Image (cartoon, rainbow, N blue to C red):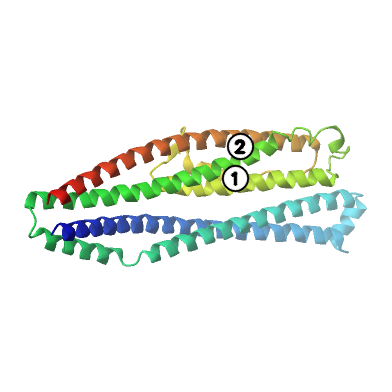
Amino acid sequence: MTTDLAQATEELAAATTAVAEHARLSAREERCREDVAAAARAAEAARVSAQTEAADVRALESYSPTRIWATLRGARDTELATEQAEQQQAEYAAAQAHARLAQAEAELVTVRAARQALGDVRTRRDQAVAAKERVLRDADTEAGTELAGLADRLGFVRSQLTELREASAAAERAASRLAAAADLLSRAGDWATYDTFFGGGMLTDAMKYDRMDQAQQRLRDADTALRHLSAELVDVGVGQVDGVEVDGMTRTFDVWFDNIFSDWAVKDRIADARRRTTSAQERVAKVRRDLDRRIGAAETDEQALAARREELVAGG
C-alpha cells in the first residue's frame, strides 16, 4: 500500500507539473505568434522603404528627368551621394527587420515543439488523479487528503521553479553579452578622434571599420539576449524593473551606426551606446538578484513539501 501510494502521489505531482508547464508554454506561444506578426509587418515596411530609396538612386544614376534637373542645378553629385547613403541606411534597416523576424519565427518553433512534446497533459493528470483516488480508498482519510493537497502544491512549486530557472539563465546570458559590449565600448573613445576621420567625416581605415562592426555585433547580441530575457520575465510575472516596463528592454539598441556622416555623429553614438549598455546592465543585475531570491524561496518550499509528503507516505 505504501509503495502504491508513493507512486500514485509522485505521478500526480508530475502530471500537475506538466499541466502547469503546458499552460505556460501555450501563453508563451501566443505571445510568440504576436511577435512574429509584428516583426513581419516591420520587415515589410522596411523592405518597401529600401525599394523606394533604391528607386531614388536609380533615378539620379540614369538618364532620367530627375538626373537632368539635378545636373542643370549643379547638384547631382551631392544629391546622388545623399540618396546612396539613405539607400544604405534603408537596406540596413531592412536587414535588421528581417533578422528580427527570423528570430521571432525561430522562437515560435521552439516553444511550439516544447508544448507539443508534453502530449495530452489533461488526460495524464485525470488518470493520475483517478489512480491516486483508488489508492486512497484504502488509506487513512486524513493522510490521504493531505497528500492530495501536497501533490498539487508540489506541482505548482516545481513549475514555478522551472520558469524561474529559465529566467535566471536568460538573465545570465544577457549580463554576459552586455559585459562583452561594454568592454569593447569602453575602449572606443579613440575611434572617432584625430586621424580616425578625414575632413568630410567618412571612416576610411579598414581596421576601425572592423572594430565598429564588432561593436555593432556585440550590441546586436546583447539586444537579442535582452529580448529573450523580457519574454522569460513575463513568464515569472515581472512587469517592471526599476519602474521601467520590461518590454522596454527590447528597444534598448534599436539604432546604432545606421549611417556615418561625421566624427561627431560617431562619437555621439558611441556615448549613447555606452549609456544604454550601462543602464541595461544595472537593470539586469537587479533582475538577477530578485530571481536568485525567488529561486531560493521556491526551493525551500519544494524541500518542505517533499519532506512532508515522505513523512506521510512513510507513516502510511
238 and 162: which is toward the camera: 162
Q: Residue at x 62, y 57 (%)?
A: 99
Q: Which percent across, then down, holds residue 13?
A: 25, 55
Say which mark, if any, is on residue 34. Answer: none
Circle 2 Cα neighbour tier, 10 Å, few/some/many (<14 / 14–19 / ≥20): many
Q: Return the x and y of residue 23 as percentages of the image width and height.
A: 34, 57
Q: Is residue 158 visible?
A: yes
Q: Is residue 225 above or below residue 19?
A: above
The residue shown at (23%, 58%) is 12
Q: Residue at x 58, y 60 (%)?
A: 102
State the residue in front, 73 or 194. Answer: 194
Q: Earlier in the sequence, mark 1 or mark 2?
A: 1
What is the x, y in percent for residue 140? Answer: 7, 53
- Residue 294 location in percent, x, y? 37, 38
Q: What is the crowding at mark 1: few (fewer than 14 residues within 10 Å), some, or many (at least 20)?
A: many
Image vertical order of residue 200 relative to residue 11, above or below: above
Question: Which kind of residue does numbered mark 2 sit on?
Answer: Thr
Report the amino acid beneath label 1. Answer: Ala
Classify the position of the N terminus by image quarter: bottom left
Examine the rendered structure and indicate whether residue 74 appears above or below residue 30. above
Question: Is 128 positioned to the left or the right of 261 in the image?
Answer: left
Q: Pointer 1: what residue?
A: 222
Residue at 47 percent of width and 39 percent of height: 245
**Could you say which is closer to the camera, residue 161 or residue 9?**
9
Q: Which residue is mark 2?
A: 277
Secondary structure beneath dot 2 equals helix
Does residue 252 appear anywhere in the picture? no
Instruction: Determine contact: label 1, label 2, CB under 8 Å.
Output: yes
Distance Cα–Cα, label 1 vs label 2: 9 Å
For mark 1, give the secondary structure: helix
